[in-house]
Amino acid sequence: MKNKETDNEQTFSKAEIESAKKTLIKMKKDIFKEIDAGIKKGSSKDSTEYRGDNYDIASSERDRELMYMLGDRERKKVREIDNALLKMKEGTYGICDECGEPISKKRLKIIPYSNLCINCQSKAEEEERKRMNEDYIDHLSTLSLISDDESFKDSDE
Ligand SMILES: [Zn+2]
């Protein structure tokens, strides 16, 4: 019965954290690289015009700029990756942000930047869907307010 130690599947060894960390950093780099390449391709001539003082702007400024170029999905992913990296530093990697329960290792293997357990994730997704729906309904009611005055009023009379 030597299984006791391996039973505790949720604890991460240093090596496991290290390799997850590498994966996360690579993922983040890849996202930025893609955006960066897109910018360079699009404006290779322009860049020579910015040789002046502007070129000294700190790289964090550039990071922010790149963040701005990201789509919502990528931006969310970068934020999640950063959060996961922070949790590694704090020693809470693999713990759900929401309920504090461990996130299954299987899940972390597929999505190393997941900060929520599967239960909280699906709850969060449902809430996001609801929120988006409400925004959409808001949007629709604004539209119908506008069109009510215009065209629909005299159709009944
Ligand atoms: Zn949870």
Image (tube, grey):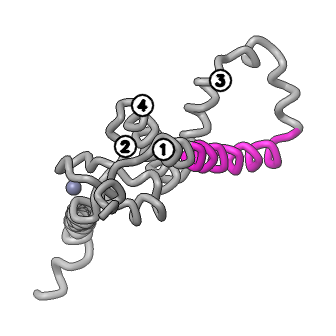
Badge nearest the viewer, 1 or 2: 1
Task: Inspect the image, locate mark 3, and give the three-letter code of the amino acid beneath it.
Answer: Ser
User: Would residue 127 be found to the left or right of residue 86 on screen?
Assistant: left
Q: Position of residue 125 (x, y in %)?
A: 28, 64
- Rounded to the nearest whole Å, what is the CA distance between mark 3 and mark 4? 23 Å
Q: CA distance from mark 2 to mark 3?
A: 27 Å
**Residue under circle 2?**
93
Name the residue furthest bottom: 156
Question: Distance from label 4 to label 1 (Cα)?
Answer: 10 Å
Q: Nearer the viewer, mark 3 or mark 4?
A: 4
In front: 7, or 156?
7
Task: Magenta stretch: give its range.
Answer: 22-44
Label the magenta part by its dominant secondary structure. Answer: helix
Q: Amino acid at mark 4?
A: Lys
**N-term mark: 1 or 3:** 1
| Numbered badge on residue 17 | 1
N-terminal of the two: label 1 or label 2?
1
